[in-house]
Image (tube, rainbow, N blue to C red):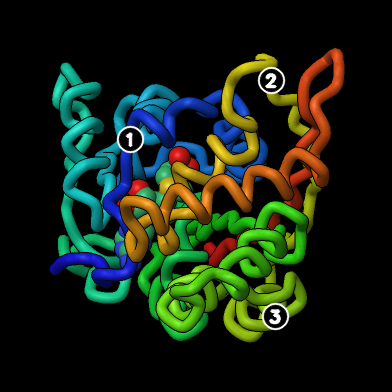
Amino acid sequence: MTEPATDSAWDPQQYAAFAGHRGRPFVDLMARVDADRPRLVVDLGCGPGELTLGIAQRWPDARIVGVDSSPEMLDRARRLDTGGRVEWVEARAEDWDPMWSGASIDVLVTNATLQWVPSHLRLIPSWVESLAPGGTFAMQVPANFEAPSHRLMREVAARHPRADDLRPGLDRAQAVARPETYAALLLDRVPDVDVWQTTYHHVLTAEPDAAHPVLEWVRGTGLRPVLGVLDGHERDAFVVDYERELEKAYPRRPFGVLFPFTRTFAVARTPR
Ligand SMILES: C[S@@+](CC[C@H](N)C(=O)[O-])C[C@H]1O[C@@H](n2cnc3c(N)ncnc32)[C@H](O)[C@@H]1O
């Protein structure tokens, strides 16, 4: 299955440009997963694979599966995984069957992915029900859709000549719920639930003549619905307008650009 035509393909290199910043929430999420000797661990929306390989190092005896819908991301993951440690599976989260292997999952982690899966509130219950006793579901989604980076993207899109074509993709890419929604959804099924939000204050390097770093950050993720619709002059005009707004919202300072970014985390564990 392919992704909707309105998004540009994932570009692992562009995504990796901020790997250090993007890896931190994953580390914080996994710090709350206290599984001892899991047998089957799934990383749903594994992306380019670095973080999945980190999971494999943490649990050397576990069977590790990375699932992603992007052939480009999986290609990079397979090339990184020189030891063939992880099973890389191309599937959309919407179609993936958590019982595909016949074995219950001990740890199901999904980091920075469910914002791209608008139906995830319907899917989470089946994922939690597929866990082994004492199994863990751990998720993290961005909660920054009202931040200037995304608000300005919508404003620039609204005044662009192709506004009607841009709106559906940008609306779809905001499909995250409030923390209390995730908490209630999980607590209806399991008693051991931990939900929290963190705002990271990323300090991004900003060379005077280089593109604005927040533009480069969202190029790899949130801007994909725009980049998939526009090309040529239309795309250039959008980027120039958007970057001008970003320069005002996130000024370049001697230390770089400060980019606050809020994320929602949820961890749920089934009874033993
Ligand atoms: C922002 S990246 C996160 C990758 C990795 N989890 C990380 O934290 O670096 C989002 C990933 O979700 C994948 N993705 C997007 N929509 C998906 C879907 N419907 N099903 C499965 N994966 C999806 C993308 O291909 C991409 O690799």
SS state under label 3: helix
The residue at which mark 2 appears reads as: 206
31 left or right, relative to 148: left
Label 2 CA crowd tier, 10 Å (few <14, some 14–19, many 20+) = some
Tell me the kind of residue under disc 2: Ala
Percent x, y for residue 187? 67, 78
Sequence order check: which comes first, mark 2 or mark 3? 3
Task: Tell me: is circle 2 under 8 Å from ligand 1.
Answer: no
Q: CA distance from mark 1 to mark 3?
A: 31 Å
**74, 86: nearer the viewer:** 74
Residue 185, above or below 10: below
Tell me the kind of residue under disc 1: Pro
The residue at which mark 3 appears reads as: 181
Residue 12 marker: 1
Q: Nearer the viewer, mark 2 or mark 3?
A: 2
Residue 162, above or below 264: below
65 left or right, relative to 126: left
SS state under label 1: helix
At 17% from the left edge and 47% from the top edge, which residue is drawn?
71
Q: CA distance from mark 2 to mark 3?
A: 37 Å
